[in-house]
Amino acid sequence: MEGIKILVVDDESRMRKLIHDYLEASGVQILEAADGQAALDIFFGVKNIDLVILDVMMPKLDGWQVCQEIRKISTVPVIMLTARGEERDELKGFDLGVDEYISKPFSPKILVARVEALIRRSQGRQAGQTLKFGNLVVDREGRKVLVDDQSVDLSYKEYELLNFLLDHRGIALSREKILNQVWDYDYYGDTRTIDTHIKKLRQKLGSCGDCIQTVRNIGYKFEVGQ
């Protein structure tokens, strides 16, 4: 991951050092912030940050507020760290456009694996293809999604989820398969993560949201109406 810039935001210096040491071994450049305001100053002041690791509970501005400000201008992948581990916090994170949600304590090796997966997927999708299904247009070269000729603002994870469904259109996909492929690691947690993302994706796709169909007792599929 040479040349990758990652912003690590946590008010605990011990936690920042732990993350810094593990990620630096992968060849990435680490930027650090101890509070929410400092995080925004760095994010808006430094060009081409590739990923943000963001704690929830911080002074000045908390992680939710920082994520909201970042999402106003950027779809950069965001991993949210929290000590709470409550379902409502996880749902709130996804609603704000968080791509990964990890509860403390966590394995540093798992964190590194998820960082590498997000970086690979954010940089690895090859451009040059435009897909059109009725009023839905996905411009993979420009990473743009249009519904009824209007631009749709998707988070990084929502965009990857939509493309995975499109690549397997007409095929019933289990929640586990979607998690393992879109999140790009073996997932042993709650598959409600998928339901949350599907709900938000349907809402954002508006009139085209019905193309994402629920397959009872299995998961979801993308099906264009006849």
Image (cartoon, grey):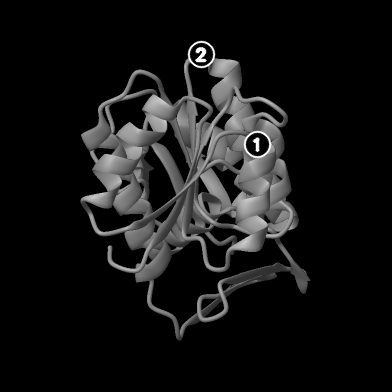
Q: Is residue 121 above or below residue 104?
A: below
Nearer to the camera, 160 or 39:
39
- Which numbered marker is on residue 147? none
Residue 65 placement, left or right of 99: right
Residue at image mark 1: 36
- Which numbered marker is on residue 84? 2
Q: Amino acid at mark 2?
A: Arg
**Occupied quadrant, residue 64:** top right
Q: Alpha-carbon neighbours of circle 1 within 10 Å: few (<14), some, or many (≥20)?
A: many
Nearer to the camera, 121 or 106:
106
Mark 2 / mark 1, whichever is N-terminal: 1
Residue 24 placement, left or right of 54: left
User: At 39% from the left edge and 68% from the top edge, which residue is drawn?
Assistant: 123
Quarter of the image that includes the N terminus: bottom left
Cα–Cα span, label 2 and label 1? 18 Å
Residue 220 placement, left or right of 144: left
List x then y, in percent, for residue 209: 65, 51
Evaluate if marks 2 and 1 touch, with contact meaning CB atoms under 8 Å apart.
Answer: no
List x then y, in percent, for residue 104: 39, 20
Disc 2, SS? loop
